């Protein structure tokens, strides 16, 4: 099982869209800045999960991630920010 997710940094008003097979662990990694050269590590503040969906395969997850990173996909993800 793979997840496509959208996380949001309230302090910096930034969105990140990604995919993984363990969503809880991945969000912890973003918040702990495990990926030192990544987009999310550039910003202080907490990243919170605002959207997720499941797929059966990584291939499907990559396709859906690409869709959500498009303009229309980002607009869809922004609709979940409260």
Image (tube, rainbow, N blue to C red):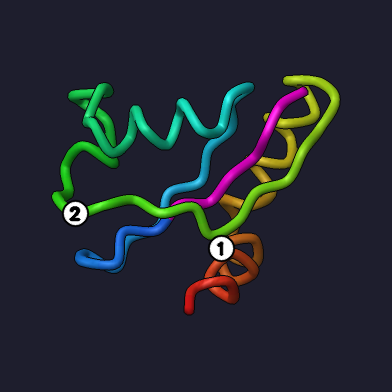
The residue under the point 60% across, 56% down is: 51
> On the rendered structure, is 17 left or right of 58?
left
Q: Nearer the viewer, residue 2 or 38?
A: 2
Badge number at residue 43: none
> On the rendered structure, is 28 left or right of 81?
left
Q: Check contact, mark 1 vs mark 2: CB within 8 A.
A: no
Q: Nearer the viewer, mark 1 or mark 2?
A: 2
Q: Nearer the viewer, residue 51 or 15?
A: 51
Q: Nearer the viewer, residue 80 or 65?
A: 80
Above or below — where is 12 with respect to 1?
A: below
The residue under the point 28% across, 41% down is: 40
Instruction: Report the quarter where the N terminus lies.
Output: top right
Is 6 in the magenta?
yes
Main secondary structure of the magenta stretch: strand
Separation (CA) of disc 1 from disc 2:
21 Å
The percent position of residue 10, horizontal first and vertical second, equals: 29, 67
**Label 1: which residue?**
74
Q: Nearer the viewer, residue 31 or 77?
A: 31
Above or below — where is 78 with respect to 31?
A: below
The residue under the point 58% across, 24% down is: 22
| Secondary structure of residue under mark 2 | loop
Above or below — where is 72 with respect to 26?
A: below
| Secondary structure of residue under mark 1 | helix
The percent position of residue 69, horizontal first and vertical second, equals: 57, 50
* Residue bounds of the magenta highlight: 1-7
> On the rendered structure, is 42 left or right of 20?
left
**Label 2: which residue?**
45
Is 42 in the magenta?
no
The residue under the point 41% across, 54% down is: 48
């Amino acid at each position: 099982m793979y997840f496509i997710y959208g996380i949001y940094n309230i302090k910096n008003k930034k969105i990140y869209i990604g995919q993984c097979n363990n969503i809880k662990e991945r969000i912890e990694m973003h918040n702990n800045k495990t990926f030192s050269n990544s987009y999310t590590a550039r910003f202080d503040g907490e990243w919170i999960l605002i959207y997720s969906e499941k797929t059966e395969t990584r291939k499907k997850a990559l396709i859906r991630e690409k869709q959500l990173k498009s303009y229309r996909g980002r607009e869809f993800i922004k609709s979940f920010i409260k």
